[in-house]
Image (cartoon, grey):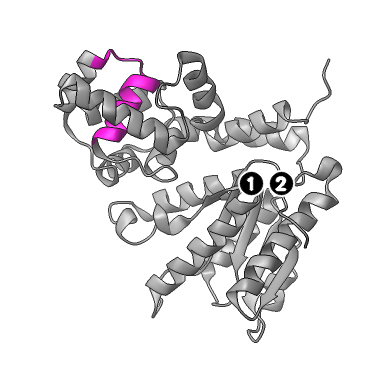
Amino acid sequence: MDGETTVRTGEAYVSGALGALDDGARMRLFYELLAEVVESVGLRAYLPHRVSDGVPAAHLEPRAVYDIDRAHVTAARVMVAYAGIPSFSVGIEVELAREHAVPVVLVVERERTVSLLLLGNPAVVDVVRFADLDGLRRGLAAALGRIADAAPGGALPEVSDDVVVQRFLASLEQARHLPDGEIAALLRIGELDGEAASTIRDAVATGRLFGAGLRDLVGRYALRGADLGVFVLRDVLERPLADIARAIGLDPRATRRRLESARSRVGLAADAQGADVAQWLVTELIAPPTRALQLHLFSGGHDAA
């Protein structure tokens, strides 16, 4: 394929076997490579092993793992699934993708055999067979480009308005108020305790912070410790910096540096103005079904009135 293919911004769910692998570290590096490819064409990559597997998931209940990954699958614009190792999880994730009209691209070595049941799943729109990593990069980028080219306007396939709204209504409350156990686990993963953690927990309980937004901050953006606390207290809850410094246990200057660091990690300017922060919160730090609705309605889903 000539040049770089760019597809509409959205999330790509990278699926692959994780549990009981003889060489888990090598496979995680492989999934990071897949993430690099999808990000090169304009998508954000979601990798379960960063959030809901191994050390990050040590404090998560199985149901919480299912809920976290299901939310990301059903909100994804596309799934990239490695089919070279048989996996119950991959099969479940591809079926979830089918149920929610998310296109799936399988990647697998040329010599590997793939289940006919998986190949026959209607969600699977392309299979990339590769002999080396360069071939994988080219083949996957081309497959994502074909998905974009096949859709109106060169975008990844849109789902109908009624399906998007149904997802939104069905998932909104669950995404807003996560189980207490998952909130506690996310705060442990985020290495945050004390007054800041209590404030964040209360914010989720009262709806001022979406629980799914906390998942994203801890998982997708990997905010930890003081960076996590300062960002939520300042940019989400709009607390004065002096109060935040006291809650975190830092001096005001260090608190400001932490805020700038956190903003940089999530893609905001260090000196972002209130309007820019507010727009980011609306489009990024809200429940996955809400984000899907926003993307659909405000990026070409409707003609202007």
Residue 204, how many percent across, how many down? Answer: 37, 27
Q: Secondary structure at mark 1?
A: loop
**147 relative position to 201: left or right:** right
Residue 36, how many percent across, how many down? Answer: 55, 57
Residue at the spot of label 1: 42
Q: Residue at x 44, y 40 (%)?
A: 216
Q: Is residue 201 visible?
A: no
Q: Is residue 205 above or below residue 100?
A: above
Q: Residue furthest bottom?
A: 111
Q: Residue at x 85, y 42 (%)?
A: 152
Name which residue type carries label 1: Gly
Specify whether residue 179 is painted magenta. no
Q: Residue at x 78, y 37 (%)?
A: 160
Q: Residue at x 35, y 33 (%)?
A: 262
| Magenta span: chief secondary structure | helix
Q: Is residue 55 visible?
A: yes
Name which residue type carries label 2: Val
Quadrant where the image shows the N terminus? bottom right
Q: Secondary structure at mark 2?
A: loop
Q: Is residue 226 above or below residue 92?
A: above
Residue at the spot of label 2: 7
How many discs appear?
2
- Range of magenta residues: 226-241
Whichever of callouts 1 and 2 sits on the residue coming sooner in the sequence is 2
Residue nearest the viewer, comparing 223 with 164: 223
Q: Are marks 1 and 2 in contact (CB under 8 Å)?
A: yes
Specify whether residue 236 is painted magenta. yes
Q: Residues within 10 Å of mark 1 (few under 14, many from 20)?
A: some
Residue 142, how many percent across, how many down? Answer: 74, 62
Residue 40, how many percent across, how many down? Answer: 61, 53
Checking the image for residue 289, the label placed there is: none
Choose top left, top right, bottom left or bottom right for residue 269: top left
